Amino acid sequence: MKTLFFTFMLCVSASLFAHDLNGTVVNQDNERLEDVYVFNQRTSTAVYTDHNGNFKLEDVEVGDIIMLSYIGFKNYTLTITEKDLNRIITISLEQANISLTQVQITPEVNTLNKFVDVDIKTNPVKSSQELMRKVPGVIIGQHAGGGKAEQIFLRGFDVDHGTDVAIGVDGMPVNMVSHAHGQGYADLHFLIPETVDNINFGKGPYTASVGNFNTAGYLNFKTKKRIEESSVSLEYGQFETLRTVGVFNVLDDDNHSAYVAGSLNLTDGPFESSQNFNRYNVMAKYNYRLPQDQELTLTMSHFTSKWDASGQIPQRAVDQGLIGRFGAIDDTEGGQTSRTNINIEHTKYLTDTKTLSTNAFYSKYDFELFSNFTFFLEDPENGDQIRQFEDRNLYGFKTVLSDKFYDTATNFEYQAGFGLRYDNADDVQLSRTKNRKELLERLAFGDVDETNIYGFLNTEFEFGDFKLNPGLRLDYFKFDYVNNLTESYDNASETKLTASPKLNLIYTPTNTVQLFAKTGIGFHSNDTRVVTANNGEDILPLAYGADLGGIFKITDNLVFNTALWYLFLEQEFVYVGDAAIVEPSGKTRRLGIDAGLRYEPLSWLYLYSDINYTYARSINEPEGQDYIPLAPDFTSTGGITIQNLNGFSGGLNYRYLDDRAANEDDSIVAEGYFVTDANINYTYKNYTFGIAIENLLDTEWNETQFATESRLQNEVEPVEEIHFTPGTPFFLRGKVTVTF
């Protein structure tokens, strides 16, 4: 009887003294902060703020100590009083240097994003290549004079220029469907690195809000809404390299903010034939805020680029002394490209928890590329130069309704969205040319119209320490192709609908451990020319993936993450933009393990490293003939960073790519490399002086490599072997930045 009475009194006491703590978290400019970690030390329960900066923490008593932490801000501690429980409190966080101690493990599906955010902010980058390299497991290579989109490697994929990685900026897609050079071509050079705030990424096809090209993973870059200080920087180095960047704060008050940014890049490169590379970028961003109601952001950007290239050279030409490592067989390669973007983002806060977000975008894109991969194999007299060209307009929008429910048996939230993307690419062509001027023959010439309508539902259910995250995505495609090589009007059209279910399970028993199991189906669309040529068969090959892993915050300043993963790809047909032919590609499977470590032994010293191993094979091929060309099996990136040490900052970074098969039987091998970069900076008042060195050890390495059959002008028979673009040698640059 006494036990029953005591239990009854405890329940009464809990109902009388335990309350919900409701609050809003803002920064010093009164901007609401999303994903702030809110932790009750007595109950060891935690929540994080929603899109509106709001949170609700249950079972809070007078005297409880509440801790808040957020990347880039000082940790905040609040001791609860009676007054706090009877109102909605507002907490303002103060900015501070980036630190691992500010990051807490929460039940988010992609928690690793937070730790990569620390990587970016402790060691700022200066190029789109470096931006992508910040994502664990991503390796980047350039092989056309700096103006062409980079070649991407991730999770045992040679992604080419974006076929199996979905890339976006502020909700606007970067990948180009049915591109003149290759499916999924993703040229990120319109992005000015100094304007990037963070990267949201995920590996595998597990995110319902991301569709086409999300098989190996996705990368979404978010630019800053506002800037703290204006700055101008000038950088000059070897190979007649010049880069100047200006970021200017033009408006900043309670409801409005705006800034403009511009950059100019020039270089001749280390090649014997000058690259004559130039790229100009400009960007403007305006943000309008109505308190607790809505937010409007307008972003406009433009870039244009021109370059010459020495191309991919055959190893035998170097071995025979015909050319040097930085020489060329055909130095008339090169190209030009431009992209103009208009992106509008609107957020309406319908209630404290419900949000309606919409973004609409338009891009005007031009592309022209001259290449020569086989030299004199097809045309012994004029050579094998090709021209790829297109003129594209890209339109689209996405609307997402999101809400959270706290007062149910289990916490529940959802994001429901729908959207449209329409590509109109005219004069998409592949031609044989001579010296960039003379048209010899058109191999492909047509107009592409491709429409993608989609809808998705992402849900999250919290059961104590568990979060269940089921999602579903539907995509409808309409492919139209007009072949302009035929005398009569030849219009082919196909449609396709596909469903992509996702299911993720997250277990977070404490704020130092997260275990996860993820599974899902993704896809990448095939080129419209493949779709229509193949009568709509096998045009949306599916990818089936699964991940099992965990993130462990061993101490306040030491974090370890790992994942075991599997990915299976269906049969597909690939359009080879360099040859205007369709090649079948069979089923493949990849099995791998990722691991990463981040350590901050001192407040000014930060170390990180990621390693990735993959076993990738074609399924239906005999053993020994089942290698996937250029699929990397072992990669690693990492570095040491110093920040704010008596005015000094800097770092030493490395990237490693192992030897890999360049053809199906591994008889031709693409050599791996280990390359290190370094930089050091000193800040005095509002001036920063810096030195950056690429390839500190002056390693001889091949940035990109392909097994290619080619014929030189003095050869009778063709030869298949490694063709490569040499990596940058020791490359020294100096830089000065002024902030005001």
Image: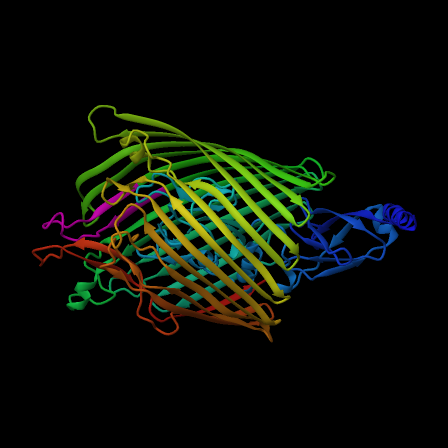
* Residue 403 vertical placement versus 97 (above, below): above
Residue 732's spot in the image, x, y percent?
39, 71
- Which residue is at a point 12% across and 49% down the rendered structure image? 382
Does 379 appear in magenta? yes
The mark total stands at 0
Q: Nearer the viewer, residue 706 or 321?
A: 706
Q: Nearer the viewer, residue 177 or 281?
A: 177
Residue 603's spot in the image, x, y percent?
62, 71
Q: Is the image coloured rainbow, by chain, by secondary structure, or in one colour?
A: rainbow
* Residue 601 vertical placement versus 304 (above, below): below
- List the single residue furthest toward the bottom: 646
Left or right, residue 81 beside residue 169: right
Q: Which residues are magenta?
A: 366-389
Residue 169's spot in the image, x, y percent?
49, 46
Does 658 appear in magenta? no
Left or right, residue 234 beside residue 309: right
Left or right, residue 408 beside residue 392: right
Location of residue 75 (image quadrant): bottom right
Instruction: Give the quarter of the figure containing the C terminus.
Output: bottom right
